[in-house]
Image (cartoon, helix red, strand yellow):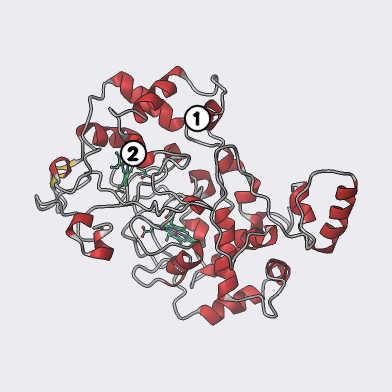
Amino acid sequence: MSVTKQVARGRLGAVLCRVLALLALVVACSPEGDSYVWALPEGFPEPRVPEDNPMSDAKVELGRHLFYDVRLSGNQTQSCASCHFQELAFTDALPVSVGSTGESTPRGAMSLVNVAYTPTLTWASPVLRHLEQQALVPMFGESPVELGLAGLEDELLARLRAEPRYAELFPSAFPDEDDPVSLDAVTKALAAFQRSLISADAPWDRYEAGDTSAVSEAARRGGEFFFSEAGECFHCHGGFLFSSSVDHAGNVFDQATFQNNGLYDVDGRGAYPATNTGLYEHTAEPRDMGRFKPPTLRNVALTAPYMHDGSLATLDDVLDHYAAGGTVTTEGPNAGDGRTSPNKSLFVHGFTLDEGLRADLHAFLEALTDEGVRTNPRFSDPWLRPLGE
Ligand code: HEC
Ligand code: HEC
């Protein structure tokens, strides 16, 4: 555990804090000993944090325990981590996820890495804007059932109260509460843990920071194409998040955005399959048909299959999709030509993908993988270790 993390803990922390201050070491610790230090690399702004849920190490630690705890499902078979695996950058390798009672979700699990910076949550909701609020969806949602906790709120809190670790973790995360074990505390701690999932140490980051040996020649060429007007990728996947839908502390513009990248056209007028119409599902505006949030491409090599419904199995399929200017579905209920959809963004216009460019784009997308995401112990399952390690 890091020194700063230890000092943030309780009375021992306060004592250590004074000792360290005497030694004139630069450690950030408030008089209460609970200030949170973001491990932010160059170029990363501070995430926006709701005023009523400030970050603290104790809250992140509680959130980590809850994230990996199967008590959070009705039948105690699933936790958040059952669909958001650390080694897969918090996705689950399935086209669409399967909930605790066997029901499929209409869409695939999304990476939670750098989720602190996304202004809207899930593939296409314009209204889910806070992680505190979003956590209630997998917990209590009934269509589809994911964790299956509807009607079991008291049972959930009783289970949590019965776990010895939580007798320590809840009060240290919420020291001002008389009864710290509450649903409000659960969603706040889950949100704090998810905001702590910052990743910015991909080879491409090191290259941008000046280490020219961090990526191959091929990756550099792929990056040039990605950021060019020929590739157009950067319009929707640009910036430090590799998504144009971005937010951070101090940002004054609403940069939430939803785009149609030509995946389907089932009726010749741009319709998407009825189960997944994107932003249209929320607005009923015809122009919003098939518009989804451009996902971050950080760690994208770990997050197959791709798109909201997992319909593109590999990165090669994705490259073929963009090179063709959309996807043609030849048979079945979703048959149609996404390339000619009237709703498609003009930035998805196709390009010639020879084997050289394919290899270059592959190398570039692979250079966005931060291996630390998979190995960082602070992101991992805490139940496998003694408390505090
Ligand atoms: C059954 C599988 C499953 C479980 C369990 C699950 N998720 Fe998810 N998660 C998904 C799917 C599928 C999506 C995409 C949902 C959509 O677009 O409607 C998602 C999306 C998200 C997002 C949005 C990310 C973004 O970039 O917009 C967050 C945040 C999230 N989940 C957090 C959680 C938390 C916290 C838990 C536990 C309380 C949890 N999930 C449990 C499958 C799951
Ligand atoms: C007009 C905006 C736009 C442009 C331009 C664009 N994308 Fe996308 N991208 C999206 C959207 C929106 C999605 C999600 C679509 C969906 O799920 O239906 C997406 C999804 C992806 C995915 C899948 C990610 C995942 O987690 O499933 C990859 C990979 C990707 N794009 C790469 C690229 C590359 C490479 C380029 C350039 C050749 C590019 N994109 C250009 C908007 C865009």
- The single residue placed furthest to the left in the displayed view is 268
Observer-nearest of 366 and 48: 48
Q: Secondary structure at mark 2?
A: helix
Residue type at the position of mark 2: His
User: Looking at the image, can residue 68 be seen?
Assistant: no
For residue 32, which quarter of the picture?
Answer: bottom right
Identify residue for label 2.
235
Q: Position of residue 182 (x, y in %)?
A: 60, 76
Q: Quadrant of ligand 1?
A: bottom left
Specify few, some or many for label 2: CA neighbours under 10 Å numbering under 14, 14-19, or 20 or more. some
Q: Is residue 286 left or right of residue 143?
A: left
Residue at 67% of width from left, 80% of height from top? 179
Residue at 59% of width from left, 37% of height from top? 42
Q: Earlier in the sequence, mark 1 or mark 2?
A: 1
Q: Position of residue 33 (x, y in %)?
A: 77, 59
Q: In the picture shown, does residue 129 fall above or below 40?
A: below
Q: Position of residue 44 (x, y in %)?
A: 55, 42
Residue at 75% of width from left, 50% of height from top? 28
Q: Position of residue 73 (x, y in %)?
A: 50, 69
Q: In the picture shown, does residue 269 fall above or below 340?
A: below
Residue 359, which numbered label?
none
Q: Is residue 347 left or right of residue 366?
A: left
Residue type at the position of mark 1: Trp
- The single residue placed furthest to the front in the displayed view is 252
Specify few, some or many for label 1: CA neighbours under 10 Å numbering under 14, 14-19, or 20 or more. many
Q: In the picture shown, does residue 221 fall above or below 201?
A: above
Identify residue for label 1.
204
Instruction: Tell me the CA gap for discs 1 and 2.
Output: 18 Å
Observer-nearest of 354 and 254: 254
Residue at 10% of width from left, 52% of height from top? 269
Q: Is mark 2 within 8 Å of ligand 2?
A: yes
